[in-house]
Amino acid sequence: MIARFFAHARFALVLTLLVSGTAAAQPPADCRPNPLNIPGAPYPCVYPDNRVTFRVAAPDAQKVRIRLGPGFDMSKGPDGLWYVTTPPQVVGFHYYTLSIDGAVVSDPATRTFFGSGFYNSAVEVPEPGTDGDYYHAKDVPRGQVRQQRYYSKVTGTWRHVYVYTPPGYDSDGKAKFPVLYLLHGWGENEQGWYMQGHVDVIMDNLLAEKKAKPMLIVMDNLNAVKPGESAALYFARGNLTQAVPQPPPAPAAAPAGRAAGPGRGGRGSLASSVFTEMMLTDLMPMVERTFRVAPGRDNRAMAGLSMGGAQTFGTALANLDKFAYLGGFSGSSGGRGGFDPKTANDGVFAEAAAFNKKVKVLFLGIGSMEGPGTKTFSEQLTQAGIKNVYYESPGTAHEWLTWRRSFKEFAPLLFR
Amino acid sequence: MIARFFAHARFALVLTLLVSGTAAAQPPADCRPNPLNIPGAPYPCVYPDNRVTFRVAAPDAQKVRIRLGPGFDMSKGPDGLWYVTTPPQVVGFHYYTLSIDGAVVSDPATRTFFGSGFYNSAVEVPEPGTDGDYYHAKDVPRGQVRQQRYYSKVTGTWRHVYVYTPPGYDSDGKAKFPVLYLLHGWGENEQGWYMQGHVDVIMDNLLAEKKAKPMLIVMDNLNAVKPGESAALYFARGNLTQAVPQPPPAPAAAPAGRAAGPGRGGRGSLASSVFTEMMLTDLMPMVERTFRVAPGRDNRAMAGLSMGGAQTFGTALANLDKFAYLGGFSGSSGGRGGFDPKTANDGVFAEAAAFNKKVKVLFLGIGSMEGPGTKTFSEQLTQAGIKNVYYESPGTAHEWLTWRRSFKEFAPLLFR
């Protein structure tokens, strides 16, 4: 029976993969395997100058393309495999897919990451020097990321949430902890902050340096629809219950963060979203029943990226009795041009002194390549007397490195 | 900024997916979406008679195939998408991939599952009636599946382990729990028992019915290589440090579990594997330091599927001072034809009475479509006076339904 596993029908395929992955051709020594590759896969690989070489086995295809940024056509090498080397890429985590004779699929050479509503491949271009140390595992005490299933009455489904518990959560059986509710972006899921964001590693490192307070981080799935509704609706409407926006005419090559989105139904649609109802009715009570949670709004924060930032502002600004800390990373509240502090978000900003007393931290993070909208919003808030923290990630776009950095700046401000 | 997330470059792609996934054509009402589909995807779908219809968007491809069992050629429908409906499939979880003009990739319509060393698609054919209830979520107290990173001195890497903790683990801060070390099969990883096996749901359900004792279940990754070795080596050699087996000449269409594997280097190679060394040196001490673990061999079990079963027998039979319960699901110890109880596994079976006293449960599970090897082995053990439990899963092959069922039979026998 030892050998039974070799009888598996998929074995032949894998040998092929292994051969194409290892024996056939190794990349040049200075092209380091993408850290997100499946174990043992030499491609994609990243050069010291951040060029990336991709390789794909597609023996009978007519056209193979890497769908990353503007996209790159591949060409067949003498070994019959398809290759392309891109120009230098921006540092950080980039989703990508393959187009094989028009079929858009993930690259079997990398792990898969849920984004845009399905599982993509990804490449991680390392930051220079020690810049990325904060999201790399070090020899420090480790928290856990727990997967908890729970039933939602609002959606009528079993749901799945990730919860970070800090080192020492188990050994001190009495201590209670503040909670950050942390949301992913459009088309992603509850795995995003862990798989793409390395949020547990960042927190473990911050805690080891005593730069942040120990806290729970609850990472749920924004996909929340009422019984009988299709989840596809969520992806189409961005989880709004009211306005179903028209998509922008964004070509695949559009610079991230530049194209203006469509007009939206205002904050009310987010505040009343299915997610907000589910969060208040099902998620928060489950968390407070299951984990040792410090009570009250002063021990509760909410933040998110992109659509999760918009959701955060929608949910929390309408429920300031429950949240004292807010963060939006590449996504926050309405405004942008027509922001009127007296009327925006049902007038929550109208009395600056009262707002500043209630909201201990209002954090706005953005990548420097995402355009001026968030900076403008921050300035508008400041002009209206609303205290806020503006952080701009240098050289990054609407991508995970912006959000890792934003989180690293935001977390130390919490629960002080 | 609310609309910022719509500016994302991938939005156009996803709209395409959504359109092809929802608006273009819904499957017939009696073809139910595969439970493993990404949210909102109507295909693949499963008919009541277990036929499965697949759909793939590959506009410019010449040949598209579903790589499931013997494989199925697809043909283009009037909507320009590729379709095929298979004959009725065996119930349970089946990995599959697409071949698009010769490129083997996962189907973007489903979640992805690590098997054969990369991320596959999968289809789940429901069991009739209530047969599958034991692995479906019910309204019972829920355990957690915790993701824990730890450093291994043996491999020189940070590793990632899944640990199931039963309901009530946190609320009773004093109780200690026995531990089952549970291994995946060749080409899979630490996610397998959770993602493919639903092990936490099975345990939660067994516990709610008081059919099993509360326990921790530690699910690590068999991929363990020494510093400087490539992980590809692990996949090629099945994690053996000594013998590097030759692959069998198995065509992709070979019936699972039928083809005889190659001769192997005997048990010694598994007992001395890098995994065993890593487990004893790094994993077990970390688990006993981090979780509330009941001490001693009587509180320790080890089991695994396929290669994980072989690894279990290799590791545990050589370390019976540490384990009192053993399980192999579609994979166990050497033997098969030439089994000699006096000499096999360094003679551990030679004194039956002593063995039976030490090993409280020796469990052998197999699918009825996998051939007679495991039954023969069980009979040989019985003839040699070695008590063992033989379980045969009706109608299933070398696949996850065999292993879910085996686990359901095995877990209630532990720690009695």
Image (tube, coloured by chain):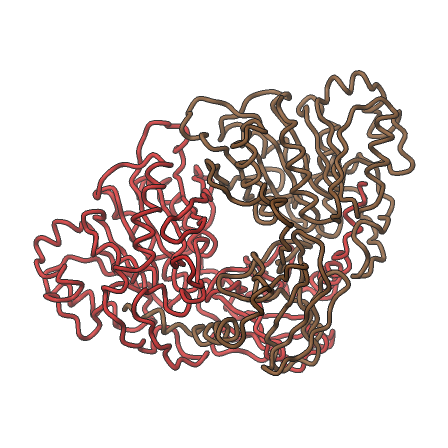
Chain colours: A brown, B red
Question: For the N terminus of chain B, which image quadrant?
Answer: top right
From this viewpoint, is residue A357 visible? yes
Hey, which residue is sitting farthest right in the picture? A338
Quarter-wise, where is residue B294 in the image? top left
Return the x and y of residue A56 as percentages of the image width and height.
61, 72
Question: For the C terminus of chain B, which image quadrant?
Answer: top left
Q: How many numbered discs, if any? A: 0
Nearest the viewer among A271 and B338 is B338
Quarter-wise, where is residue A274 in the image? top right
Quarter-wise, where is residue A193 in the image? top right
Q: Say if B88 sits above or below A282 in the image.
A: below
User: Which residue is painted at 8% across and 58% down in the image?
Assistant: B351
B416 horizontally vs B109: left or right: left
User: Which residue is painted at 29% across and 51% down in the image?
Assistant: B302
Return the x and y of residue A72 as percentages of the image width and height.
73, 69
Return the x and y of residue A47 as percentages of the image width and height.
63, 62
Nearest the viewer among A140 and B343 is A140
A253 horizontally vs A11: left or right: right
B207 horizontally vs A184: left or right: left
From this viewpoint, is residue B133 visible? no
Return the x and y of residue B105 as percentages of the image width and height.
58, 70
Q: Say if A153 sits above or below A362 in the image.
A: below
B206 horizontally vs B27: left or right: left
